[in-house]
Amino acid sequence: MFTNLTSQAQLVRSYSNEFLNIGIGARAMALSKSVSSFSTGVEAGYWNPAGVITVQDFEFAAMHNSLYNGIGSYDYFGAALPIERDDLAMSISLIRLGVDDILNTTNLIDSNGNINYNNINSFSSSDVAAIFSLAKSFPKLHLNVGVNAKIIRRNIGGFAEGNGFGFDVGAQYTWNGIKFGAVIRDVTTTFTAWTVDDSIFDDIASAQTTEEGQNQEKPESYEVTLPKFQIGASYFKQLNQKYSLLTSIDLIGRFIETNDLFSSKYASFSPNLGLELGYKNRTYFRAGIGNIQKEIDFDASESVSLEPSLGMGIVFKRIHLDYALTNVGAGSGINYSNVFSIKVQLNEMR
């Protein structure tokens, strides 16, 4: 059955469940998401499940961000703990992207053609995911591996609901002080099943505010999201007693042809670069470059666009406070947001 579904082109969605590609943690966002090789602890449950193995005790992290001038909100909470010290660890990550108080004007015009503002109500649209991560270490091989199981619930008021599931796999490897990371998201493809309230859909399709040819066809019942990949490397150097430097690069892409910097009919990807300068292991200054895309201008010439990001972080007794100025949830370059996040490691708080 699953093979039959995926063989129908109209069901395959290369860009479905995109809220899971926005990213979490101000540190990672300031480094333009180039963190697959060194992401550790609770936040690794999102970026690379292999990094969850580094937790020594309970770790918690949270992030909130307002999108589109406060119209939408993007929230994250994560928790991680070791199962067997230095051998197994697990985490859970909760992510919600939502827009609340959307006006429903379907019944604004009644059957007699009169406008009745009392018929206006509101609804919310939200995408929610729970990510369960399990990581294992192989010290003799300098290798960590991890897997994510994702449960997805998407809701558009009372109109439609989608439920899905999928898996990610990741690995981290260290060689001569250089760290390598690789993640394949939606490795088995992610399947989402939609249900639509027929009575509400009929009201929308026949509403007098609906233009001919729009909202007339019932949406498809299934979506299949194709896999994505992220491959990276990083190098950390202690410059002197006060300063340290971390450099990183990640290749982020999909197994389709896109407008990424490097593109073919088999795969497309763009490099994301990150730089972190540390001072006394307490204060950090960060910068990154990402989302490098090829664009076609009005005169048919081709140009390259990119998105820089900046940030800083402070560590106090294993409380990590991070800030980033970055483009969140949009490829147009006009949605720069202030992102704040916090991570707490309890092993140093007892």
Image: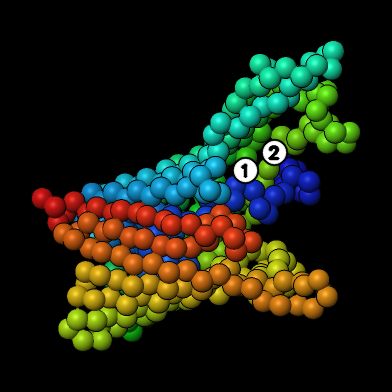
Looking at the image, is 147 positioned above or below residue 116? below
Residue 137 picture quarter: bottom left
Front position in the image: 115 or 348: 115
Front position in the image: 90 or 140: 90
Q: Is residue 191 left or right of residue 40?
A: right
Q: Is residue 282 left or right of residue 39?
A: left
> Looking at the image, which residue is at 47% across and 69% down?
309
Residue 155 seen from this side: no
State the mark number for residue 191: 1
> Looking at the image, which residue is at 66% across and 33% down?
194
Residue type at numbered disc 2: Tyr
> Looking at the image, which residue is at 64% across and 48% down?
16
C-alpha gap between disc 2 and disc 1? 7 Å
Query: Which one is earlier in the sequence, the residue at label 2 or at label 1?
Result: 1
Residue placed furthest toward the top: 112
State the mark number for residue 222: 2
What is the crowding at mark 2: few (fewer than 14 residues within 10 Å), some, or many (at least 20)? some
Front position in the image: 339 or 184: 339
Front position in the image: 171 or 251: 251
Residue 110: % across, % down: 79, 15
Residue 150: % across, % down: 49, 45
What is the crowding at mark 1: few (fewer than 14 residues within 10 Å), some, or many (at least 20)? many
Mark 2 in CB contact with mark 1 (< 8 angstroms): yes
State the mark number for residue 304: none
Looking at the image, is 250 positioned above or below residue 156? below
Residue type at numbered disc 1: Phe
Looking at the image, is 172 positioned above or below residue 110? below
